[in-house]
Amino acid sequence: MFLNQLNDNEKELYLQLCAYAVMADDVFAADEMESIALICHEMMLTNHMPDTEEHLDSILDKLNIIASRQQKNIMILELMLLLKRDGVLDESEVAFLEHVKDMFEISDEKYTALYSLSEIYLSVYKQLSENING
């Protein structure tokens, strides 16, 4: 949705975050792989699974240095949408999001607002899809 606002370096680092996000629950489902492909497409990157050899906190530290507050808000929102795509947000995924929130120094109020908006977005998207496809 907003990922085109990231620069090339941020896009690749964000893609690495996505890989960690989808592995947070130790289940890499087919719809999550499809999500990675859609994210690559949105960011105009070649579809690929990013390298995950670098530690998560190292990636977050790099993003803290180069990304603006707005870009960090975009990334946490997009991660929420990614993890909610399968309709289930388990404890490990919630913990992952909260870790990113803390590392990005996103306030509880902003996090809660973005979380609520992600719920609304997904509900509207589902309704639109049902009406278009039904």
Image (spheres, rainbow, N blue to C red):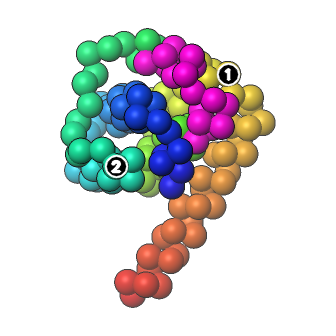
Q: Is residue 120 visible?
A: yes
Instruction: Examine the rendered structure and indicate whether residue 64 appears above or below residue 40.
Output: above
- Majority secondary structure in the magenta region: helix
The stretch of residues the image draws in magenta is 59-74
Q: Is residue 89 visible?
A: no
Q: Residue at x 23, y 50 (%)?
A: 30
Residue 105, x across and y down, in percent: 67, 22
* Distance in Å between CA atoms under marks 2 and 1: 28 Å
Name the residue beneath numbered marker 2.
44
Q: Residue at x 34, y 49 (%)?
A: 44
Q: Quadrant of residue 58?
A: top left
Three-letter code for the amino acid on which mark 1 is drawn: Glu
Query: Label 2 neighbourhood size at 10 Å, few (<14), some (14-19), many (20+)?
Result: few
Q: Nearer the viewer, residue 16 or 124?
A: 16
User: Quick one: SS at disc 1?
Assistant: loop
Q: Earlier in the sequence, mark 2 or mark 1?
A: 2
Q: Nearer the viewer, residue 80 or 87?
A: 80
Residue 103, x across and y down, in percent: 59, 18
Q: Residue at x 50, y 39 (%)?
A: 6
Quadrant showing the C terminus: bottom left
Residue 111 part of the magenta segment? no
Side (left or right) of 77 relative to 133: right
Instruction: Examine the rendered structure and indicate whether residue 95 appears above or below residue 121.
Output: above
Residue 102, x across and y down, in percent: 63, 21
> Residue 105 shows which numbered tag?
1
